[in-house]
Image (cartoon, rainbow, N blue to C red):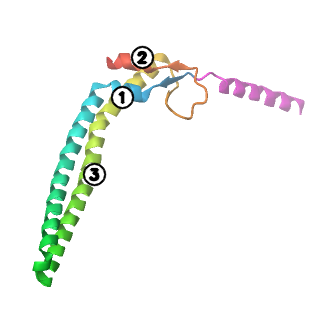
Amino acid sequence: MKKLSVLFAAVMMVVSVGMAKAQKIATLDVMGVLEAMPEKKKADADLKTFLDAKQAEIKKKADAGQAKLKQYTEEAPKKTADENKAREAELSKMNDEINQMQDKAQKDFVAKRDAAYEPVEKKLNDVVTKVAKANGYDYVMDANSSAFVYKAGTDATPAVKKELGL
C-alpha cells in the first residue's frame, strides 16, 4: 500500500510539473493594427463610396415618391374614387420598391464588406501566426479585450506592425 501511495505521489508530481510549464502569452492591439493597414483603409473608402451611392439612389426614389404623394394629395379632391384608389396602389408599390431597395442595399453592403475585409483579416492572421511562431508565443490575445483584468505580458503589436511594413 505504501508503494502505491509513493507511486501515486510521483505521478502527481510529474503531472503537476508538466502543467506548470509557463505559457508564453502576448497581447496585440488588433484594432490599432487594422486601422494602420492601407488595405483596410482602402476597403473602408470603397465601402463608404458604395454605401453613399446606394443611399443616393434610394433617396432619389424616395424623393420622387414624396413628390408624387404631394401631387396626388393636392389633386385627390378633383379625381374620382377609382383614380384615387389606383394612385394609392401606385404609391404603395413605390413604397414597397423603396423598402426592397433598402433591403437589397443592406445585403449587398454586407456581402461587399465581407469580401473586402476577408483578405485583410487573412493577411493579419497570417502575420500574427508568423510572429507568434517566430517569438515562441503560445497565445496571442487582443489587448482591447475586456477579458483582461491585468496585462503585463509581451506586446506583439510592434512585431506584427514591423512584419506588415507599417
Nearest the eye: 51 or 139? 51
Numbered mark located on residue 152 in the image: none
Query: Disc 2 marks which amino acid?
Result: Ala
**Among numbered discs 2 and 3, the one appearing first in the sequence:** 3
Nearest the eye: 89 or 35? 89
The residue under label 2 is 159
Nearest the eye: 123 or 11? 123
Residue 85 in the image: above or below residue 53: below
**What's the magenta bit mostly, secondary-structure-wise?**
helix
The residue under label 3 is 106
Asked where in the image residue 35 lies, by quadrant, the reply is top left
Q: Disc 2 vs disc 3: which is toward the camera?
A: 3
Q: CA distance from mark 3 to mark 1?
A: 24 Å
The residue under label 1 is 34
Q: CA distance from mark 2 to mark 1?
A: 14 Å
Asked where in the image residue 67 lies, by quadrant, the reply is bottom left
Secondary structure type for disc 3:
helix
Q: Residues within 10 Å of mark 3 (few under 14, many from 20)?
A: some
The stretch drawn in magenta includes residue 11 = yes
Query: Disc 3 marks which amino acid?
Result: Gln
Secondary structure type for disc 1:
helix
Where does the magenta region start and end? 1-23
Q: Are marks 3 and 1 in contact (CB under 8 Å)?
A: no
Residue at 20% x, 39% y: name it: 49
